[in-house]
Image: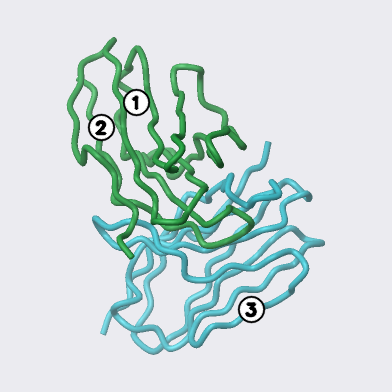
Amino acid sequence: GENVEQHPSTLSVQEGDSAVIKCTYSDSASNYFPWYKQELGKRPQLIIDIRSNVGEKKDQRIAVTLNKTAKHFSLHITETQPEDSAVYFCAASKDQAGTALIFGKGTTLSVSS
Amino acid sequence: KAGVTQTPRYLIKTRGQQVTLSCSPISGHRSVSWYQQTPGQGLQFLFEYFSETQRNKGNFPGRFSGRQFSNSRSEMNVSTLELGDSALYLCASSLSGLKETQYFGPGTRLLVL
């Protein structure tokens, strides 16, 4: 079955720096890649997603890139702020509905001011 | 609109018992997915229901089952509880599940003693 590897497991940056989180997936049939942010004690929330027919997607300070050939995708956060501190999860799905999400183990991002 | 709700929020059971968790999706959402979250294994997909039918299934034993009602509310049941079933159980809903945003509920924290 699908396996998603996520790196790094922890990431500490200074406010204003950029942060990059990388994920690789094993099943070339995967076609939907969302990213979720989970703050301590709260539910995961979608921050951005990308479909396999797109190579890059941006939303303000957040961007995601996808390399289908290498089977990896990355989350880029620019101008980090303390409120960006959270656990970030990447996920991949190959089912048509995109609902059977296989998650990476998560990256704990700490942004210090 | 009200968000995804889950009941109960906390539950303590003993080994061998069974438990039923409930999830009420956002009004109008027809897809409900269930996930198990633990510190060791992270977020793992259990199953997804759409229009009262199980559409996708993860790699969990048959002790884990679910169903969806005509109003899209969903329940999951775990029989013959094991210590390792202690986890946060999250459900997520989306409109039709066609690679749309999944909105997570607050979760039910289950402790098996």
Q: Which chain is cyan?
A: A
Instruction: Assess whether mark 1 and mark 2 are in contact (beta carbons under 8 angstroms).
Output: yes
Comparing A4 with B22, the one in front is B22
**Colour in which chain B is drawn:** green
Q: Secondary structure at mark 2?
A: strand
Comparing B61 with A74, the one in front is B61
Residue B81 occupies quadrant = top left
Indicate whether B102 appears above or below B54.
below
Residue A68 is situated, as x and y percent measured from the top left of the image, at 78, 62
Badge 3: chain ID: A
Determine the CA span between mark 2 and mark 3. Answer: 37 Å
Q: Residues within 10 Å of mark 1 (few under 14, many from 20)?
A: some
Q: Residues within 10 Å of mark 2 (few under 14, many from 20)?
A: some
Q: Is residue A48 left or right of residue B73?
A: right
What is the image's colouring?
Answer: by chain
Indicate whether A52 appears above or below B19.
below
Image point (29%, 29%), residue name: B86
Q: Amino acid at mark 1?
A: Asp
The residue under label 2 is B110
Q: Is residue B94 visible?
A: yes
The residue under label 1 is B85
Kindly identify which numbered label has been placed on residue B36.
none
Comparing A60 with A21, the one in front is A60
Residue A32 is situated, as x and y percent measured from the top left of the image, at 66, 58
Residue A24 occupies quadrant = bottom right
Image point (44%, 23%), residue name: B64
The residue under label 3 is A57
Badge 1: chain ID: B
Q: Are marks 2 and 1 on the same chain?
A: yes
Residue lying at the far front in this picture: please name it.
B70
